[in-house]
Amino acid sequence: MVVRVHGVHVAPVRFRAFRPMKKLVVVNDKMQKNYRYYLTEPIGKNFPPEFKPELTPQEMLELGVFGGKYMTDCQLEFPISWFKKAKLSPEKYDSKLNYFKVRASQSLKIWQEKGWIYKDDPRGWFQWYCRYYMGRRLEQEDKRQIKRWRAIKRHVVAIINNCRRGDLNCRPRQRQAVLHWAYDSRKF
């Protein structure tokens, strides 16, 4: 039986008496049909020490990322609270919804052509992060995505080295881009 818990469709599954309950998530949206995964960790917990995102998925959606276009058809998969104040544009990408009011991301088609998309997360890094944050773990893919997240730090360093602290008008495109990777570019 699949039930809705904290805005997520889940089915509890018991594997062994000594293991905690795992939750099955079944996804049916525009990009995935009957995709299934398990939540094995508590929401927002048990990240490795080298992975310290500065923003939660909910905070990112509220600030304004991906021109509001991201996740407009897959809200049933995640907690309702993530979308109460989210800046979304179901019709089309709208850079005015981004925190820095600029376009700072490449199209999904380019990401696909470059081989950056993992089959289980066809929307890319942010979808992986949302699912990871919720408690899904895929050992090899998690390592790959955390490595990619750490590589974005070079852009954080570029902003710090080239902008006065707090000057949010300096490098807005780069600031928006690192915001898409859960670095809080308002703070440096």
Image (spheres, helix red, strand yellow):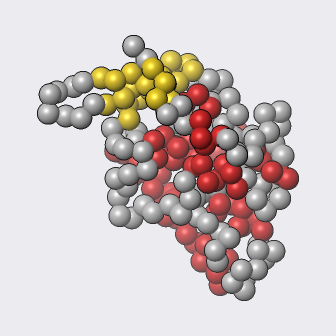
Query: Where is residue 145 drawn, in percent x and y?
Result: 47, 51
Query: Where is residue 178 drawn, in percent x and y?
Result: 64, 63
Which image quadrant for residue 68? top right
One can see residue 35 in this view: no
Image point 34% across, 53% down: which residue? 46
Image point 79% across, 39% down: which residue? 89
Which quarter of the rendered picture does the N terminus lie within?
top left
Query: Where is residue 119 drawn, in percent x and y?
Result: 51, 33
Which quarter of the rendered picture does the C terminus lie within?
bottom right
Numbered-mark total: 0
Query: Where is residue 2 drawn, in percent x and y?
Result: 43, 17
In the picture provided, is 18 more to the left or to the right than 64? left
Pick the front one: 24 or 155 = 24
In the picture provided, is 182 more to the left or to the right than 99? left
Which image quadrant for residue 83? top right
Q: Is residue 34 above or below residue 38?
A: above
